[in-house]
Amino acid sequence: MPGAGTRPTSRDVAQAAGVSQAAVSLVLGDKWRGRVSQATAERVREAARALGYRPNLAARNLRLGRTRTVLLVVPALTTEFFAGVYTGAARVASQHGFGVVLYPSPEGIGPARNPFASAQAALDGVIASSMAAEALTAIRGDQLPLVMLDSDPEGSVGAATVNLDIADGVRQVTDHLLGLGHRRFLHLAADVPSWTFEVRARELAGRLREVPGTSLRTARAPISIRGAEASAQAALAGAPDRPTAVVCDDDQLAAGAYKAARRLGLRVPEDLSVTGLDDLALATAIDPELTTVRLDAELFGERGMRALLAVLEGRDPSEGDIPVDLVVRGSTARVPAG
Amino acid sequence: MPGAGTRPTSRDVAQAAGVSQAAVSLVLGDKWRGRVSQATAERVREAARALGYRPNLAARNLRLGRTRTVLLVVPALTTEFFAGVYTGAARVASQHGFGVVLYPSPEGIGPARNPFASAQAALDGVIASSMAAEALTAIRGDQLPLVMLDSDPEGSVGAATVNLDIADGVRQVTDHLLGLGHRRFLHLAADVPSWTFEVRARELAGRLREVPGTSLRTARAPISIRGAEASAQAALAGAPDRPTAVVCDDDQLAAGAYKAARRLGLRVPEDLSVTGLDDLALATAIDPELTTVRLDAELFGERGMRALLAVLEGRDPSEGDIPVDLVVRGSTARVPAG
DNA sequence: CCACTGAAGTTTTACGTATAACTTGTTCCT
DNA sequence: AGGAACAAGTTATACGTAAAACTTCAGTGG
């Protein structure tokens, strides 16, 4: 009889069922066919149920040398985007008997510290979003299989990468605005060093360079509505050759641009077109609803987990970028005359 | 020499430093004073560094019988609220050498399934938000120390509870609206069975019952902007004795109420006052900015973790409810004449 | 000079599991 | 009849760590 308060072990179950510990392990591990009789197996299962036996995961992990647990490192969970990524990753993981532990990096989207100080769980692999070389090194020092989300395929030496086709999204936005006659652009950029934001800047600038008569200014802001508001207000204040379109690095920045516009007496979209990127719930909460690029967060998470499974099984993890779609709503309109 | 690809163990470090495995454990566990010489300790640390040694957590957890890891069960991470809770909990945890694993329950705020199927990590305790009896039973079956967030102190048998003073928040909102002359109220309620929402309904109804000449209708909606929009639109459609104030169970529902109002040609706040609860970033992104009740998510998480630590150490976890504040912004105004 | 103390270690063991290797008894084929 | 083949188990071991219990040796006080 196990002491009160102590959790029952497989040995307790064995004793209760009148068999050896090995038999218990075989039965509960579903490896008993041809090794244990049907009747005995049932007896073991009954004993386990009666005692409320739950295997000690630390012991199992030690024995097997793996945990079937992976870490998902994400920037701070200030939007629902990474909730979607987690959902997708967790769905695929559970189909393969894996668990996903979520680690929101304290520093936001930028460089993240070594997550292993916090996550006491032993891990089989890591899916990391938008991290800097520093943390990457710490992880690779641990020899852990690694998949990078939304990161430079060149920069992440050896690690598999899974990316959304952000560049194409920016192209679609830019072409949409050019088609509406816009020529003077403001890029409201995230004030965070990350490849994913570099792509936006590069692609927008590149596309505009191909079209004569266009101009591009850039304003940087921390990724928050308040921060974006201040930055956008300053950038839009000059009346003479004010931009007619604001391309924002994400929907939160776009919401800040709305507020700046309102403060300056500019109407969206009559005086100013605004675009976002993400398609958060926020995008349809604000008025007018935001023209933005829809990112499929769940698919992103699924693909990330699938890539990690491939790495773990020694398969090739590479697949193409995930397509994104422009969603045209009420925040973009034909360029105002004059 | 450890085989290529295998992680070095404490035994490898011992061999490299020319000492026993026990000495390595003592030195790295900082228990060496009076047991190992300064010089040897330094030699061990150097060897560990050289080999890139990281202790096997599964083995440590098995040996110690604890993991210094706790699980934080939250509803789906669709708003930044629970990100704040996590941040607060993780901060306190790391100060005490604990890690926090985040488990977003797949079913939203309502009844959650047993999280242990997914989280392969062995756990020392659980902080669970707004869960139903079903999951609670599963957890208590595991004999795990448990702290409930935002749950009925009566219903959660034996488990410690940490609560925000939501009731007081609802009182403040109601008194604010009554003071502005409102008498016809619509309660836009979350369509989810949870104690935290029952409190809102009870408190609002109770307060209005004390004031003669008031009326209260209730509309239920899933917690999303879209869902709230549809529900609020239906509830506000009847012209004659339409409510003049909409009290929403959270900010997302309030954003939906804005959209319904706009669709019906009602101006906020001139024709309709709207209030929320949470004070999300969304609250200041919409126009007009939302009058709402600010909840201190980080403090909530801190208090939750502190309570769990108290339980783990056999101390009394109980503290008072966390105060909340009404934040008056532009979405509430004096009741329209007539 | 000898018992004693303290420093500086080492040896050993236990944590709970999964599984390889072994044992025993029965059935079946030739 | 004699073993081969198989069912139905058991015994023993390893995973990597932490720490209790033991050893060895040098110095010290009476």
Image (cartoon, coloured by chain):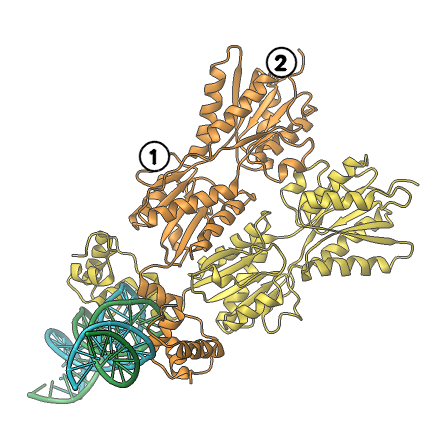
Chain colours: A orange, B yellow, C green, D cyan
The residue that appears at 47% across and 15% down in the rendered structure is A209
Residue that numbered label 2 is attached to: A240
Residue that numbered label 1 is attached to: A155
Residue nearest the observer in this picture, B27 or A41: A41
Residue reaching furthest to the right: B338
Residue nearest the observer in this picture, A124 or C19: C19
Residue A259 picture quarter = top right
The residue that appears at 61% across and 53% down in the rendered structure is B296
Instruction: Classify residue D4 as left or right of residue B60.
Output: left
Question: Could you say where residue B168 lies in the image, as x and y percent from the top left?
Answer: 73, 58
Up-down: is A61 above or below A188?
below
Instruction: Classify residue C3 as left or right of residue A18.
Output: left
Chain letter for the residue marked with disc 2 in the picture = A
Gap in angstroms between the C-alphas marked 2 and 1: 42 Å
Instruction: Determine the secondary structure under disc 1.
Output: loop
Instruction: Classify residue B163 as left or right of residue A110.
Output: right
Chain letter for the residue marked with disc 1 in the picture = A
Mark 1 burial class by Cα count in 10 Å: few <14, some 14-19, many 20+? few
The type of residue carrying mark 2 is Pro
Q: Earlier in the sequence, mark 2 or mark 1?
A: 1
Which quarter of the rendering shows the C terminus of chain B?
A: top right
